[in-house]
Amino acid sequence: MKPPPKWKTAVLVWIAIYPSITILFLLFGEQLEQLPAPLRTLVLTLILVPLLVFVLLPLLHKTFARWLRG
């Protein structure tokens, strides 16, 4: 099976990551502000990468399967 166009994959990643980052900052913004930028980035990526790879992207791939392949 042919993979979806890269631009559609990019849209799906954006749909997953934008709300995730927004929610993390709403929940933990004050605590994250106290950290130096490299540590803040480390914490965010330690949370977001597994969340995207194992939860959000598989869910979005199922939800948007027809659009991705269309």
Image (tube, rainbow, N blue to C red):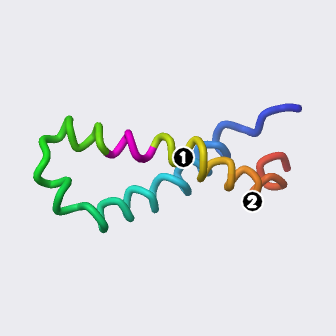
At x 22%, y 44%, the residue is: 40
Q: Residue furthest top?
A: 2
Task: Give whichever of 50, 10 is nearer the camera.
Answer: 50
| Amino acid type shown at disc 2 | Thr
Mark 1 secondary-structure assignment: helix
Q: CA distance from mark 1 to mark 2?
A: 14 Å
Task: Give whichever of 49, 17 is nearer the camera.
Answer: 49
Any magenta on residue 46?
Answer: yes
Instruction: Decide: few, some or many residues near mark 2? Use Cα within 10 Å; few <14, some 14-19, many ≥20.
Output: few
Q: Earlier in the sequence, mark 1 or mark 2?
A: 1
Residue interval drawn in magenta? 44-48
Residue under numbered circle 1: 52
| Amino acid type shown at disc 1 | Leu
The relative height of residue 63 versus residue 52 in the rendered view (above or below) is below
Disc number at residue 34? none
Q: Position of residue 62 (x, y in %)?
A: 76, 54
Instruction: Decide: few, some or many residues near mark 1? Use Cα within 10 Å; few <14, some 14-19, many ≥20.
Output: some
Q: Are marks 1 and 2 in contact (CB under 8 Å)?
A: no
Q: Residue furthest right?
A: 1
The quarter of the displayed image where residue 20 is located: bottom left
Q: Main secondary structure of the magenta part?
A: helix
At x 55%, y 57%, the residue is: 15
Q: Residue furthest bottom?
A: 26
Q: Position of residue 5 (x, y in %)?
A: 72, 38
Please state, as top left, top right, bottom left or bottom right, where the N terminus lies in the image: top right
Task: Indicate left or right for 48 with 69 as reference.
Answer: left
At x 76%, y 39%, the residue is: 4
Disc number at residue 63? 2
Task: Indicate left or right for 40 with 11 as reference.
Answer: left
At x 78%, y 34%, the residue is: 3
